[in-house]
Image: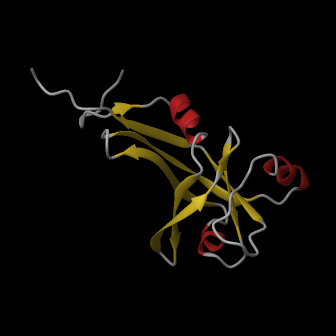
Amino acid sequence: MEVDRNGLEVLSRDECLRLLGTAMLGRVAVSTEALPTILPVSFAFDGRQILVRTGRGTKLDAATRDAVVAFEVDDVSPLTQTGWSVVVTGVARELTGADELEDAQQHPLGRWVTGDDHRVIAISTDVVSGRRLVPRREPP
């Protein structure tokens, strides 16, 4: 097991992608008007890319036209002081082809609110990293 300088377990790409598939809520970091913005999103992971539903005119829509974005998901328990975090950097693009959209429909994309959110953004998983927080062991 590899441990970083902070004592966190370094996760392999395969483990990061496995954990990514267990979550439903994440955050997308985008740049809008030269400023960073972090947006909470419901998402699905299809084994290759992250899928996010959005509507026209949203910050996510405006910021993800073939832009490089960051995506983060985690699961942390304050009670046990354990958990994990996965960060993905990739290119965000709208799915427009009939086959792509049909494939995306095979994965449930949750909604935060009702509305005109019929567009699907896909984020590639070009760079993936993750860490796991393991319980501290007190010295004897």
In the displayed image of the protein, which residue is found farthest to the front? 79
Q: Nearer the viewer, residue 117 or 125?
A: 117
Q: Write down the quadrant of residue 109 in the picture.
A: bottom right
Q: Is residue 66 above or below residue 131?
A: below
Task: Tell me what residue is drawn at x 25 percent, y 33 percent.
Answer: 7
Count of numbered circles in the view:
0
Q: Quadrant of the N terminus?
A: top left
Q: Nearer the viewer, residue 18 or 61?
A: 18
In the displayed image of the protein, which residue is found farthest to the right? 98
Q: Nearer the viewer, residue 80 or 76?
A: 80
Q: Is residue 76 above or below residue 140?
A: below
How is colour applied across the structure in the image? secondary structure
Q: Quadrant of the C terminus?
A: top left
Q: Position of residue 56 (x, y in %)?
A: 72, 76
Q: Write down the quadrant of residue 54 in the picture.
A: bottom right
Q: Nearer the viewer, residue 99 or 117?
A: 117
Q: Position of residue 87 (x, y in %)?
A: 47, 47
Task: Tell me what residue is drawn at x 34 percent, y 24 percent.
Answer: 2
